Image (tube, rainbow, N blue to C red):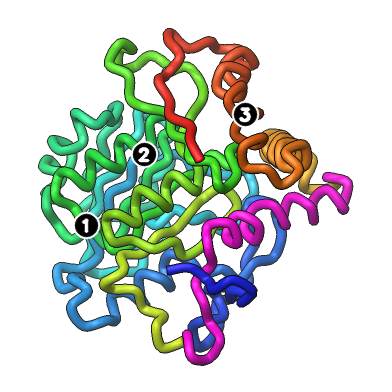
Amino acid sequence: MSAARGTPCSSTGLWVQPPETTRLNTFLQPTNLLSISRLVAEVCGRTGAGCKAGIQLANFGAGEYLTPFSNVTTLDPVNSLLLGTANARALLVDADAARLRKAVRALPPSKVVALAEHVTPHSVRNQLQRAGLLGAPLSVLKIDIDSFDCDLLMATLAAGTRPRVIVLEANVKFPPPLRFSAHFDERVAVGSRLGKPWGCSLAYQHAMLGEFGYDLLHLDTLDSVHVLRSVWPFRSAWPLGGRPCSVQQAYEAGFSEPCRRAERAGWSGGYASLSAVRAMCRHSEMRLRRSNGSAEQLLEAARKEPTHQDKRQKDKGASLARWTLVL
């Protein structure tokens, strides 16, 4: 599903009644994009959504959403769902034990299986099984491991899970229509850092998940949100003007425009601490500008990015991960 050409798509926070409460995004800018808590409530409110067993979550990269800004609402579904739900179960996996402890400190132990270990396409089935979630109708799957994210996603889906909602970090340095993905490489020992590049692009995620029956809801700065088509909760809003965004519209609204707003503000004030995001913004904007609207020129320029990203790392990877880049 995508917005018809020439038809503006609506903010997903305006599709629900009452509208979603305004919060701050990664750019410290106000946004009313639908929160994961509200989205899961909308999805699970549908007959046949598969939520009778309660909220069930798998969170790979569970420590990724720790933020120094106390007033910034993160997208991590674990923090937003486990505390407010009586019947819930979650698998949290992160190789950094300290980050994992901090992430689960306030969570009810009875609801959480926390594993301080690496996750790979080969290990994910066993990890889901240890948490009692193998084959379960997951309410939310979140993946943010800064590595072979889409390969892990494919392995998770192959294990028989069909999450109602999927949250993924998108490598925004590869704007639509570029389909980029870093792949799992068995030559690199578990525990060593895979060389950059990392993750997968929004267009790659959209194309891959479309084959499994998912639609893109929105991009919230660096995080994409996808919903299983069979439980998509917003159909009744469409006659009123609500339309799901295309992958290009989602990238523009969720990343490019917030970048421009921060640029117009001179990246001053709170933006000063967002140096990594600022670099992503400028890099993406420069690449789009130099391509002059040509997808072929954009692809040619992007071919240099994987090696370029790794050369700039202080902590070199043991090996450069395999990757795919196509239109």
The x, y position of residue 122, in whole percent, is 19, 28
Residue 246 among magenta residues: yes
Is residue 273 visible in the rendered image? The answer is no
* Marking on residue 150: 2
Vertical placement of residue 242 versus 185, above or below: below
Asked whether disc 2 touches disc 1, contact meaning CB atoms under 8 Å apart, the reply is: no
Residue range of the region highlighted in magenta in the rendering = 238-267
Front residue of 249/135: it is 249
- Residue linked to disc 1: 162
The x, y position of residue 29, in whole percent, is 71, 60
Local secondary structure at mark 1 = loop
Q: CA distance from mark 1 to mark 3?
A: 35 Å
Magenta stretch prevailing secondary structure: helix
Looking at the picture, which amino acid does disc 3 mark?
Glu
For this view, does 94 lie left or right of residue 34? left
- N-term-proximal mark, 1 vs 3: 1
- Residue linked to disc 3: 300
Image point (63%, 51%), residue name: 26
Looking at the picture, which amino acid does disc 2 mark?
Cys
Judged by depth in the image, the label closer to the viewer, 1 or 3, is 3
Q: CA distance from mark 3 to mark 2?
A: 22 Å
